[in-house]
Image: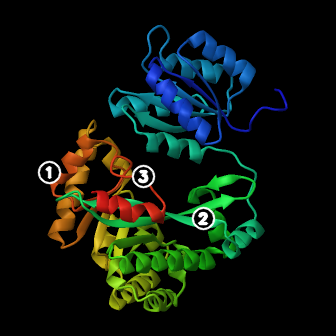
Amino acid sequence: MPDNFSANRLLIIDDDAAILQTVTMIAETSGFDSCATDDAAVFKENLASWRPTLIIVDLQMPGRDGIQLLGDLATAKSEAAVIVATGADTRVLDAAMRLGRERGLKMAGRLKKPFGLEAVRALLDKHRHLPDLSSEELAEAIRSDQLFLEYQPKLDCRDRRISGVEALIRWQHPLRGRLNPDLFIPLAEETGLIEPLTDWVFDAAVRQAAAWQGAGVILDVAINISAKNLDSADLPDRLAQCCDRFAVDLNSVILEVTESSVMRDALHALEVLTRLRVKGFRLSMDDFGTAYSSLVQLQRMPFSELKIDRSFVMNMTHDESCKVIARVIVDLARNLGLKSVAEGVESEEVWIALCAMGCDTAQGYHLGYPISFEEIAPLIKER
């Protein structure tokens, strides 16, 4: 293999030219070299000569379908991670994933057509190889001016008004470029840097909320809290003091916590979360519906809203089971006196369906991309 080959090489085969063009574009912005084809022979040639690190295979193609190509990959003993895509029933995707694993392939994920940009980007980011980041680099990023926040609009399902934003941390690394949080949050959690990182995020988001408030823009601000943060008994006091310092109403701040983080130490989490609610913060159970004991934790913990996991939302228009689950979560939230939030809205069809269900708030690329703080106020005035 040539020395100048990238560590991230995507090979994609699909008989839809628009999909090949779109995925190639996303790959290039995600740090991948890419090779796209609709020809099985060319695919096999590139597999041998180019040695991709990630492969996307369309299962439904004339001539030689994706299932046969999975067999070719197994015969070639490919070490690439494999993503399968199809417009067929999700059970076909499940069967293809099982078949690939049984043949010794590294099955990395699946894409149900029509899929959105966010789904492709998330899978590529997940399988992008980078040299390991160091705790020294992250500590320097926190101290210096390398971190920044973007804000994704959250829309009220009743009138499409922007009612809030979710603060999303980014790292503009001096050598690696822009890094999304999934590439450095685990490092922060492993090295004890999650506390100063969370303090930085909270301070920046609340400071910005105060600036918006001073300009007459009143927004709820959602901030993600790590599982490790819940280990800190002083977390409620630290966050409340930050809001007091900037004169921001604690009730306008929503702390998003995944259920899996709550399950690490349920009793201690219950104490910390209850103290946060007592002080006036709102709590959102993020990724609701993906953990086995969701209803148990929901009954025990003082959450104020449920956030429907994107895996259900993105697939609900072409997978009836996902639509049923989304509707059940919306109804459950309403009957418990909680707000419902949907993430991963990537089409008008999904948005209309959520509104018809009575969902309270939604976010996703169809409704608004994460943007800088300077763009929020003009966007609100425009709408």
Q: How is the image coloured?
A: rainbow
Q: CA distance from mark 2 to mark 3?
A: 21 Å
Tell me if residue 287 can be seen.
no
Say which amino acid is labelled 1.
Ala
307 left or right, relative to 157: right
Residue at label 3? 369
Sort mark 1 into few (<14), some (14-19) or many (20+) by Cα contacts within 10 Å: few
- Tell me which label, 1 or 3, sits earlier in the chain: 1
Q: CA distance from mark 1 to mark 3?
A: 23 Å
* Residue 316 image offset from top left, x and y in percent: 27, 43
Q: Nearer the viewer, mark 1 or mark 3?
A: 3
- Residue for point 31% across, 48% down: 313
Secondary structure of the residue carrying tag 3 is: loop
Secondary structure of the residue carrying tag 1 is: helix
- Looking at the figure, which quarter contains the N terminus? top right
Q: CA distance from mark 2 to mark 1?
A: 36 Å
* Residue 80 image offset from top left, x and y in percent: 65, 33
Residue at label 2? 185
